[in-house]
Image: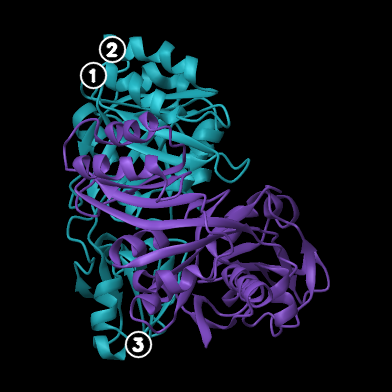
Chain colours: A cyan, B purple
């Protein structure tokens, strides 16, 4: 059986790069064959898994500079029965791609807004007068570069290679510690089967999201106390609006414990008592991605 | 003296609409004259206040659907000596602006990515085959609409009016409860003077941001306990990455108390004991904006 893996496309996006690494890793470590299926948005790639068009999706969930990817959080909350199988952490190295002979010929730079934001300092120093134009993805930013020699795009070196375009500058991100965390997502009912594809039996992280009854002061405090009293460390707490009214939030929490661990089993009924809706996205391990592979 | 008020431009953005309301409100209630100064980014409008190019800035900080405006949070954290004077809450009503004779002639829709996201359901229902193209602002999306009758933009009805463009559909946002909270920002040293422009002497909210020492489990819990034990309700808790390494966060907190209230005065030294950096952005009131004025 060949697995199909949905991701934000077109080929050459950072998400595709992470998904590509994952396909190779699956093949090398478990002999599993998988193909990549690009989708125009993150939400559509998760939807593809929810409706069984794809077995897995690779989605970005957090960047060390720009923070949480709200589209991923919102889609995970809205779609039912999705499960996290694995986290991938990949260093992000932005490159400036252009057919211009030199930097001083460039008048316009295209990229995804997050990539433009992550190179803001470099752009102000080396290209202070250029116009910055947002695109839906770092790959879409490459369109038309060959025809327009006064334009450039910020994208990955993999994208430059895939589309045979020249790199004018590499490592142009302002923060060298730039990295993105991705989640590999499956359907609930495929959990047992997909669990086959993760290497270790005991997992290190559990992710969940919850909403609290409106207008209950200290609701988040109660939730955090449940974890603290059971000695469970939280590696991430993120608020998202409920979309009902300004000032009402959901909370996304990553706990450093396996769902089957005794302290997590004690935490769950306590959390249920304090929450309106509690969604558990499963337990998983973190795999570092080498972008060269 | 005429005040200059920096905002994300060009004229016709939702931020300009909020700033325009504020200018009228200042004039009506305090007889103060003010002019609007558009800047290409939120960060640049805050920078203008930091370097004394403008006395005040109006910046979006949170939308009820899309959540926190990370550029505002990051710039507030990075720039020193900025102070919140007032919060403005404005309902957001998106309109589809186009010179096309009817919806079925439209092939392309331009807007700011947040506006496109907020109308996703409407677009899928009424314009399922159009191409969605991001722009830096909802106003920038209006460029070229007159020449290209197969294009449309999502923007405010005020923008349609300002640029004399026809509205094809109104209230196209998926969530009717869509509203955005803005902050009016000044420099610290102008606080006494700017405080003159806020109507009431006792304020309802205090905003602050803090970083905690790295790798201290339960650091956020300690912070929340300080507020809970003093009976201070928190209306918002938001994490942002420190940009140093994945999994390290700053926290932005809005407390429902005046900075000079006894319980807030007790909280501050306790917070200092648990934080690495503590930034207090001041106390302020919330003013509802009627977008028609």
| Residue B193 percent coordinates (x, y) | 45, 74
* Residue A263, label in figure: 2
The residue depicted at 72 percent of the width and 58 percent of the height is B127
Pointer 1 residue: A231
Lower sequence index among marks 2 and 3: 3
Give the left or right position of residue B96, taking residue A187 as reference: right
The residue depicted at 57 percent of the width and 48 percent of the height is B65
Same-chain check, marks 1 and 3: yes
Of badges 1 and 3, nearer the viewer stands 1
The residue depicted at 50 percent of the width and 71 percent of the height is B136
For the N terminus of chain A, the image quarter is: top left
Q: Are marks 2 and 3 in contact (CB under 8 Å)?
A: no
Extreme residue in the bottom direction:
A105
Pointer 3 residue: A129
| Residue A3 versus residue B51 in the image, above or below | above
Chain designation of label 3: A
The residue depicted at 20 percent of the width and 21 percent of the height is A200
| Residue A229 percent coordinates (x, y) | 28, 17
SS category of the residue bearing label 2:
helix
SS category of the residue bearing label 1:
loop
């Amino acid at each position: 059986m060949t697995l199909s893996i949905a991701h934000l496309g077109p080929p050459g996006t950072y998400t595709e790069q992470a998904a590509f690494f994952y396909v190779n890793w699956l093949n090398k470590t478990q002999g599993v064959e998988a193909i990549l299926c690009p989708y125009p948005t993150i939400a559509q790639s998760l939807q593809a898994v929810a409706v069984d068009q794809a077995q897995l999706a690779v989605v970005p969930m957090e960047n060390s500079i720009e923070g949480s990817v709200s589209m991923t959080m919102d889609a995970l909350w809205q779609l039912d029965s999705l499960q996290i199988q694995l986290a991938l952490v990949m260093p992000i190295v932005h490159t400036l791609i252009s057919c211009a002979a030199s930097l001083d010929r460039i008048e316009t730079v295209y990229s995804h807004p997050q990539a433009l934001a992550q190179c803001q300092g470099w752009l102000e120093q080396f290209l202070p007068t250029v116009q910055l134009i947002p695109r839906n993805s770092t790959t879409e930013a490459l369109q038309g570069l060959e025809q327009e020699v006064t334009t450039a795009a910020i994208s990955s070196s993999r994208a430059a290679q895939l589309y045979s375009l020249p790199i004018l500058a590499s490592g142009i991100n302002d923060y060298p510690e730039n990295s993105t965390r991705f989640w590999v997502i499956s359907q609930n009912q495929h959990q047992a089967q997909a669990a086959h594809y993760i290497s270790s039996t005991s997992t290190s992280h559990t992710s969940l999201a919850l909403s609290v009854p409106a207008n209950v002061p200290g609701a988040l405090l109660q939730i955090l106390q449940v974890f603290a009293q059971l000695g469970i460390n939280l590696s991430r707490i993120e608020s998202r609006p409920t979309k009902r009214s300004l000032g009402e939030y959901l909370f996304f929490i990553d706990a450093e414990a396996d769902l089957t661990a005794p302290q997590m089993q004690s935490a769950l009924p306590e959390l249920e008592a304090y929450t309106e809706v509690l969604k558990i996205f499963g337990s998983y391990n973190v795999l570092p991605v080498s972008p060269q592979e």
